[in-house]
Amino acid sequence: MKQLLIFGCLLAIVVSSHAREQGVPKLNDPDPGQKPPEAAAEIFAPDVISLPGRVEFCLALNPDENEAFFAVRKGPGQWEIHKTARKDGAWQPSVIAPFSGVHSDLEPTFSPDGRRLFFSSNRPLEGRADADGFNLWLVERQGNGWSPPRPLPGPINGPGDQWRASQGRSGRLYYSSMGLWSCPFVDGNAGQPVKLFDPQSPQGLIGGHAFVSPDEEYLLTAWMDGPGHCGGWDIYISFRDGQGNWSPSVNLGDAVNTPAGEDFPLVSPSGRDLYFFRHQKTEDGEESGDIFRMDAGFLPALKEKALATSK
């Protein structure tokens, strides 16, 4: 049941100065590694990162957008993290990340400064015989490589499974564990987590696998059966108002969401592009999925709608 739930979840326009006032990053020039994005979503780096017959999801980009990590399904209930780099304007074929490949590792995300990479893993926790699920881990930059993985402390890692962590510049961490939680995480020390979204409330923010903007101005989440839901998992956005409260979630619409199911949103560090996973099934019932990419310039216009709904 847990594996079914896990895999069910796997599912250049320059913004005006008004958009910057709204806290949404300014979009820059097109990615030189791929043609300029069109209005419609397109598969990211086809035949290089997004391969036919392989499931890839949860892209993570470093601040310079020349290094990427993502998860690959290697078997039922088994995942590994791959890494790739962009050289001479082109993304290179991926290889297994040096800290992955033995246990099931998935859902990588960079810290805003690119010095840390968070991920979820079922590798054993030392001294925790009862911790046989998925917990959050991190690796840190060490020269041209990465440190050995270490688990995040309690109370972040606790009962149940912990999924995709996204961090703002303040150090505050957002992660999923039977709901979405927010927790201070500075210098390796964790504060008290606060549950942000009540899954029982139809007016609440019911989401997971969140991406938070570096300034924590907006959240992108994925959830089922929300307002305007298109089928499967849909991606939503919520904005923080002047009092620090989160608005109700707004569906990103059919430019992003389809009956196939979408998950694991990411806005590039430049604020230019929106990346997400699209989960599909082939005609013979096999699972498939790729990372998609599109212009993120439509996101600022959703703030007024979101905040108006909260009133």
Image (cartoon, helix red, strand yellow):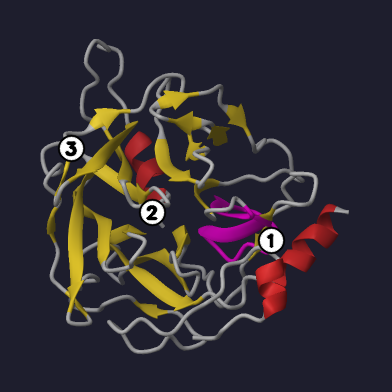
| Residue 277 percent across, percent down from the top left | 39, 63
| Residue 89 percent across, percent down from the top left | 22, 82
Magenta run includes residue 219: yes
Segment colored magenta: 217-238
Q: Taking 307 as reference, is 3 left or right?
A: left
| Residue 91 percent across, percent down from the top left | 20, 75
The quarter of the picture where residue 118 lies is: top left
Could you say whether the residue bearing mark 1 is in a helix, strand or loop? strand
Would you call the spot at circle 1 few (<14 residues within 10 Å), some (14-19), or many (20 or more)? many
Q: Residue furthest front?
A: 143
Would you call the spot at circle 2 few (<14 residues within 10 Å), some (14-19), or many (20 or more)? many
The quarter of the picture where residue 263 lies is: bottom left
Residue annotated with mark 3: 147
| Disc number placed over residue 250 in the picture, else none | 1
| Structural distance between the alpha carbons of marks 3 and 1 | 39 Å
For marks 3 and 2, the one nearer the N-term is 2
| Structural distance between the alpha carbons of marks 3 and 2 | 28 Å
